[in-house]
Image (spheres, rainbow, N blue to C red):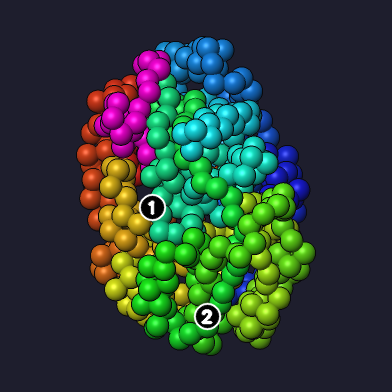
């Protein structure tokens, strides 16, 4: 997260008043709804990475204690006080969810600041503070030759956040990050401290995994790690229609440990070509170098990435860079270096626009239909798609709010959105069309992003949502643990 975005997130920097509004998308819209949506900022509000979720809060406190008695006492105090006043409580970490999922309206917002990581080599696990960021986990594991088993693609996020959205990464063939968590300790809404795992309080474990902080306040987790390795990339370019079959075949190769895909995004030739990138163990595994941050390639890539806005020729040039030039320049890298990437690498630095993510999960055999859906919906919208990454997610047998009820291809889409009411309206329309189309082919969508889905769409994509909400109400009758995921979705009658 670069300075501009960090300042805005903290409410410290008002957006440039009266800045000219640019429209970059495919059609020629009217001027209605073109005024910039400007977060007010200040102490009484909290925002998230979308910059579009500004919400009034009662207070925001940062807790720095290790996961011991002092932290538990501080959390119990907040729970007691909030319950007595009828206010909600929510913990957040980086607040990169994009629809207020980590913000309690008029409530007690808590942020953890403690990077405790205690590796246990004998058990292949580490105990970690709930608020530790993945950069801190990598910094602790890399020197002893280990690596997180599954984390999402950027290292700025909090470990309990990752469990609470049940994020996935690109190691293969793996399920979401929750599949690598052995146990958690959390405070329930009544202040009870419990341990939950697949064998102890298993119901609570399955509710909290992907439960958006609505079940308990997690204080620490025990998570699996794997040996760090030196990896060699290989690249294959192909028509998009062939991607799913080639991807699945690649996942079956036992020596492939990390794998992802990309599609081209020019409006004129949208989603016609695919790139498949796989990593296998390198021949040489001794003396692994320390985990690097962003390389010069990633920083140069940012400039090309941002220049794509509104320009099909630049989008074509970027695709050539990625699919032709990149493979010729790429070399070996350690697993830890590959995943040690901060969000700042792609920061947009433009106060009139914001980056918005979407993500859809479809079975590999329905992927070609998904590509056709995207070709029908996205290029004709006003939205600027800059990138799509394709990942594999194994079946999630644990989480009540599972998005991968079978093996899935995850399509992670990055849009640059104008910060105006008309762009919000267009994004809402496009999101709902993509969700409807995805549900019609048996797929699902991801919940940490903008709250544009309808409640009916949530229930269609997550058939156990009503069961989740009923269990939450039984556990938390005063509804002390709340955020916008509850207020706009899970707490709303279908
Ligand atoms: C640039 C970018 C890249 C991304 N890449 C991926 C990816 O590769 N794969 C993927 O699956 N997702 C990805 N995501 C989504 C990302 O994983 C989620 O948005 C995640 O929540 C971000 O972590 P955070 O620390 O910002 O979470 P926050 O927004 O701070 O919190 C997320 C949720 O976790 C809950 N929570 C946090 N801490 C606790 C706690 N201690 N106890 C109980 N509940 C808690 C919060 O209440 C909230 O509901 C990406 C998002 C962005 C913006």
Question: Magenta stretch: residue 174 in it?
Answer: no
Q: Is mark 1 within 8 Å of ligand 1?
A: no
Q: Is residue 102 left or right of residue 302?
A: left
The region drawn magenta spans 190-212
Q: Is residue 418 left or right of residue 366?
A: right
Give how far across and how far down residue 433 sits, in percent: 36, 68
Q: Is mark 2 within 8 Å of ligand 1?
A: no
Q: Residue at x 35, y 57 (%)?
A: 394
Badge 1 vs badge 2, beta-carbon distance below 8 Å:
no
**Disc 2 packing (10 Å; few <14; some 14–19; many ≥20):** some
Which mark is drawn over residue 175?
Answer: 1
Mark 1 vs 2, N-terminal side: 1
Q: Nearer the viewer, residue 219 or 42?
A: 219
Query: Which type of secondary structure does the marked residue at label 1 adopt?
Result: loop
Query: Which type of secondary structure does the marked residue at label 2 adopt?
Result: strand
- Residue 164, compared with residue 49, is above or below; it is above
Residue 264 visible within the image: yes
- Residue 440, compared with residue 186, is above or below; it is below
**Disc 1 packing (10 Å; few <14; some 14–19; many ≥20):** many
Q: Residue at x 49, y 79 (%)?
A: 274
Q: Nearer the viewer, residue 235 or 445?
A: 235
Give how far across and how far down residue 93 sits, in percent: 57, 37
- Residue 195, compared with residue 166, is above or below; it is above
Q: Nearer the viewer, residue 233 or 357?
A: 233
Q: Nearer the viewer, residue 135 or 252?
A: 252
Give how far across and how far down residue 201 sits, in percent: 29, 26
Q: Quadrant of residue 229?
A: bottom right
Give how far across and how far down residue 187 sits, in percent: 42, 21
Residue hosting label 2: 236
Residue 485 visible within the image: no
Q: Residue at x 37, y 71 (%)?
A: 248
């Amino acid at each position: 997260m670069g300075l501009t975005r960090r300042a805005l997130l903290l409410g410290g920097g008002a957006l440039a008043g009266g800045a000219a509004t640019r429209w970059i998308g495919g059609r020629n819209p009217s001027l209605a709804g073109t005024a910039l949506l400007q977060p007010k900022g200040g102490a009484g509000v909290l925002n998230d990475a979308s910059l579009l979720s500004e919400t009034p809060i009662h207070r925001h406190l940062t807790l720095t204690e290790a996961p011991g008695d002092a932290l538990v006492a501080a959390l119990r105090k907040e729970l007691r006080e909030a319950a007595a006043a009828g206010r909600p409580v929510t913990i957040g970490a980086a607040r990169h969810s994009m629809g207020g999922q980590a913000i309690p309206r008029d409530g007690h917002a808590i942020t953890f600041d403690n990077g405790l990581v205690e590796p246990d080599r004998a058990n292949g696990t580490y105990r970690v503070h709930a608020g530790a960021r993945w950069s801190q986990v990598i910094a602790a594991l890399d020197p002893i030759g280990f690596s997180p088993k599954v984390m999402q693609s950027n290292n700025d996020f909090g470990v309990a956040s990752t469990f609470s959205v049940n994020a996935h990464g690109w190691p293969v063939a793996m399920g979401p990050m929750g599949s690598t968590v052995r146990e958690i300790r959390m405070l329930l809404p009544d202040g009870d401290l419990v341990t939950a795992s697949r064998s102890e309080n298993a119901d609570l474990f399955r509710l909290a995994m992907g439960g958006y902080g609505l079940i308990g306040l997690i204080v620490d987790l025990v998570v699996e790690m794997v040996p760090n390795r030196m990896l060699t990339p290989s690249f294959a370019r192909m028509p998009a229609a062939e991607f799913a079959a080639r991807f699945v075949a690649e996942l079956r190769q036992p020596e492939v440990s990390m794998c992802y895909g990309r599609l081209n995004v020019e409006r004129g030739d949208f989603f016609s070509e695919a790139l498949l990138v796989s990593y296998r163990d390198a021949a040489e595994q001794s003396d692994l170098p320390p985990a690097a941050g962003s390389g010069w390639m990633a920083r140069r890539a940012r400039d090309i990435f941002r220049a794509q806005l509104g320009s099909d020729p630049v989008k074509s040039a970027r695709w050539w860079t990625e699919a032709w030039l990149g493979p010729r320049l790429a070399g070996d890298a350690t697993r830890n270096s590959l995943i040690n990437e901060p969000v700042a690498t792609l920061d947009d630095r433009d106060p009139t626009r914001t980056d918005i993510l979407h993500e859809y999960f479809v079975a590999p055999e329905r992927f070609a239909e998904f590509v056709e859906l995207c070709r029908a919906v996205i290029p004709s919208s006003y939205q600027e798609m800059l990138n799509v990454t394709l990942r594999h997610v194994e079946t999630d047998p644990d989480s009540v709010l599972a998005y991968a009820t079978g093996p899935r291809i995850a399509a992670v889409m990055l849009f640059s959105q104008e910060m105006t009411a008309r762009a919000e309206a267009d994004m809402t329309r496009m999101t709902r069309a993509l969700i409807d189309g995805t549900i019609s082919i048996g797929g699902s969508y991801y919940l940490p992003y903008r709250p544009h889905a309808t409640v009916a769409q949530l229930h269609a994509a997550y058939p156990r949502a009503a069961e989740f909400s009923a269990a939450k109400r039984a556990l938390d009758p005063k509804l002390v643990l709340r955020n916008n995921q509850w207020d706009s979705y899970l707490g709303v009658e279908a």
